[in-house]
Image (cartoon, helix red, strand yellow):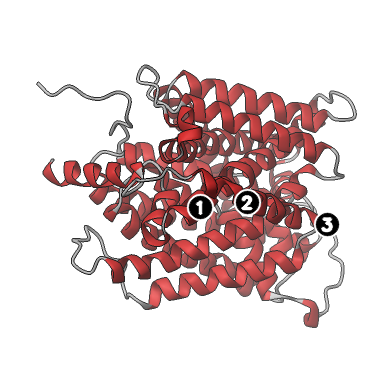
Amino acid sequence: MTVRDLSQPQAQLSVFDAVTIMVGLVVGIGIFRAPSIVAGSVDTEWMFIAVWVVGGLVTLIGALCYAELSAAHPNAGGEYHFLSRAYGRSVAMMFGWARCTVIQTGAIAGVAFMLGDYLTQVAPLGPHSSALYAAIAVILFTGVNVIGTTQGKNLQVAVTFIEIAAIAAIILFGLLGSPGEAGPPASHIPSETAALGMAMIFVLLTYGGWNEAAYLAGELHDAPRNIVKVLALGTLILVVLYTLANLAMLKILGLEGLQGSDAVAADMMRSVAGPPGEILVTLAIVVAAVSTLNATIFTGARVFYAMGRDLAVMRWLGKWDGRGKAPVNGQLAQAAFALALIGMGAATPNGFKAMVDYTAPVFWGFLLMVGLGLFILRWRYPGQTLPFRVPLYPLTPALFCLTCLYMLHASLRHTGASAWVGLAVLLAGLPILLLKRKNDAAPTGETADRNNTAAHLRH
């Protein structure tokens, strides 16, 4: 009988589990906020739907690139591990620092702020109500995931299905119903100000989060083959849900109604189902925020775990709790950073926007490096057997890289001062390069990767 080492990530997630986590990560609050901004950036109804479909195709291309990387290098460190293999540990550690202090923790704080904004409408807690709710939510869901991966996974399955059911109700009411009272009047938007590029920024922001599935490869059954199914199925589900939801809202409100609405789903449901419909959407938004927050906390701590294995001074982060089957120390450190960012966001007029600005340039910069890393790894290891190859190489990964480059440019041009704070925090991590373990032929993550790949192929 083989004795499993519970101090390492175990293959305990099925394709169903991983797809559910991926969908829960992505289907969040964006679908309830972005459509009005996207509608204000296009001139026609067909273009409004087209940008959502194109955004889904771009997301699918990115997912296929990640599928090749994840299948060839399955590891709980995800992007941290890809960057280490392609560029060396210095770049990987800077990404780890960025993810710990900017990307992941900023995303957690941003979603927590949005949850706090909606809960404040129901039961305000004072002048800093949103920040208080955000902090409570981070502490609560970190606690659930510290108890164990199984508990965190089960919670994610439950809230994701509630969330999808609510969105399905919106789709059915919109596609089968008829408009009631007219939607809100739209302000006139001259055609010369309609910016298709701006529309794509918010569409891709709404699709954002799919890349987190890469962090599940180290815990997925038969990862080299199944990670492809997870990324492809998850992305297709997202494209269908988003396209149908926007078709439903467009049918009821029309393009002008969408352009003039700050709460498109609520306005649509009020039009076809009255106040009860509006209440349904509010509950759906809360559930969506809960789903995204829990899933982001679930996957986020894995990079803390990977960094802890590569840095002697942070070795305590690289411990895997065999009882709860989770990186508990990494989860606690992640929560501490997220709470600090919530404190920073509380000092701004809009905590959610501040967190989006804070994370965007750093996120798109490293996503570009991951895309380029696919070319580098194919060149560096020409004889390596690839369980999955991205179709139409090199056109598809090149298109993905160009998209990331454009988004990096747009995030620097259109975001506020918080974006530069995020970049400053990234640069503040440069001294971490002095803490690299010496005399290591390869980072621990790479050794684990080779062992995991061999084990998967033998199995």
Element under label 3?
loop
Q: Which mark is residue 203?
A: none
Contact (Cβ within 8 Å) of mark 1 with mark 2: yes
Name the amino acid, label 2: Ile
Residue at the disc numbered 2: 31
Label 3 Cα neighbours within 10 Å, binned few <14 / some 14-19 / many ≥20: some
Residue at the disc numbered 3: 184
Asked which quadrant contains residue 149, the reply is top left
Which part of the image, by quadrant, shows the C terminus?
Answer: top left
Residue 447 in the image, given as x and y percentages of width and height:
28, 44
Contact (Cβ within 8 Å) of mark 3 with mark 2: no
**Horizontal side, residue 303 vs residue 274: left or right:** left
Residue 455 in the image, given as x and y percentages of width and height:
17, 41
Label 1 Cα neighbours within 10 Å, binned few <14 / some 14-19 / many ≥20: some
Disc nearer the start of the sequence (1/2): 2
Residue at the disc numbered 1: 241
Q: CA distance from mark 1 to mark 3?
A: 25 Å
Residue that appears at 29% across and 41% down: 448
Disc nearer the start of the sequence (1/3): 3
Disc nearer the start of the sequence (3/2): 2
Question: Does residue 246 appear in this view?
Answer: no
Count the marks: 3
